[in-house]
Image (tube, grey):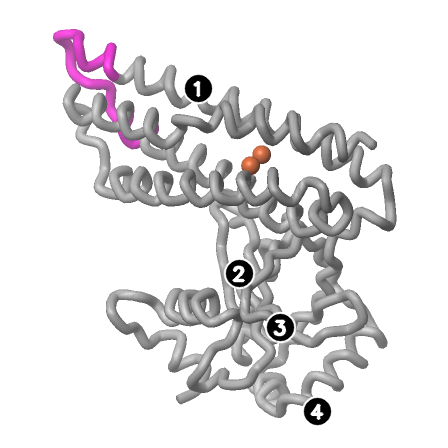
Amino acid sequence: MSEQQAEQHTDNGLSWNERVIKEFRANGGRVGGMFEGAPMVLLTTMGRRTGKPHTNPAIHLHDGDRYLVFASNAGRDTHPDWYHNLLDSPQVTLEIGTDEGAVKKLATRAQVLEGAERDRYWERQCSLDPAFRDYETKTARTIPVVALQPLDLAADSERSRMIGVQLVKHHEDLRAGLARVRAAIEEALGATDTAGPRPVGLTEQLRKQCLTYCYGLQMHHIREDGSFTAFEDRFPHLVPAITRLREEHKVVEAALAEFEAILDKGISGEPGDLERVRAELDRVVNGLQEHFTYEEETLLPALEG
Ligand SMILES: [Fe+2]
Ligand SMILES: [Fe+2]
């Protein structure tokens, strides 16, 4: 089965991508079948139109401290979505299997290789894995080679300080976003109390606003999980606090998945339905303010040096 056919194949309601991701995470970064023994990684990019996190499996080549990935799209004539996403936002979260059988997440910055450097690594990859030579013959496209450089805080103390500033800024944005979503729900509830007709499109607008907030929060936590690996290397005394923060991210992630499932079914606009959405949102964000505060209190003193 070619990679292209495999991607279209679905099993148990999961897409090909979803099955590979599940297997990768459950088996310390190893995947069987057609990818048995292949050096797989998972890339999470931010959807350039939706802001939604997108995770894709890819084969990588290790080069010093960088990880190289190839936007082959199995030889199709279009670049894969993840490539367009990283051009728009080069912060990529990489998941890779460790020697201990776990999966670690790394915060990386993507750089598209050009010219002779690109050609050199492309040739190396084709000689290691002939499937890539085959992809090249199927398309007139020059298949991009992307270097992912992991965040290293030991190299640059100014970088640590900037990450601290960004952390506070993101939390401010997320707190403000939350207030806006809550206000929109209250407004929708108010509109349904009046005798007149419901404003057209209000519930759809509300659903989109809730989803955008969810995606923003998911993206923030995924990127933080990657950065935490660099924080632990640089500031070992933070390991217990970071372990707690990672656990809290998992709790929020599970609640967000349930909230998204409710939003996917649509909001009817009836007061009972809107109240249910409000209650679910409260459940999702329960503890979130404390999470932000704890994160700032524990991480900022170290990041600010
Ligand atoms: Fe966090
Ligand atoms: Fe945070």
Q: Residues within 10 Å of mark 4 (few under 14, many from 20)?
A: few
Question: Which quadrant of the figure contains the C terminus?
Answer: top right
Q: Which residue is mark 2?
A: 81
- Which of the pair 248/1 is nearer the observer? 248
Q: Which residue is mark 1?
A: 180
| CA distance separating discs 3 and 4 | 25 Å
Q: Which residue is mark 4?
A: 127
| CA distance separating discs 3 and 1 | 45 Å
Question: Measured along the vertical axis of the image, is residue 291 above or below residue 255?
Answer: above
The answer as to whether callout 1 falls within 8 Å of ligand 2 is: no
Q: Earlier in the sequence, mark 2 or mark 4?
A: 2
Tell me if 55 is positioned left or right of 270 in this view.
right
The x and y percentages for residue 163 are 73, 36
Amino acid identity at mark 3: Asp
Q: Residues within 10 Å of mark 2 (few under 14, many from 20)?
A: some
Amino acid identity at mark 1: Arg
Q: Residues within 10 Å of mark 3 (few under 14, many from 20)?
A: few
Q: Residue at x 15, y 10 (%)?
A: 196
The x and y percentages for residue 213 are 44, 33
Amino acid identity at mark 4: Ser
Residue 9: which quarter of the image?
bottom left
Quadrant position of ligand 1: top right
**Looking at the image, which residue sits at the far top?**
194
Foreground: disc 2 or disc 4: 4
Q: Earlier in the sequence, mark 2 or mark 1?
A: 2
Foreground: disc 2 or disc 3: 3
State the mark number for residue 255: none
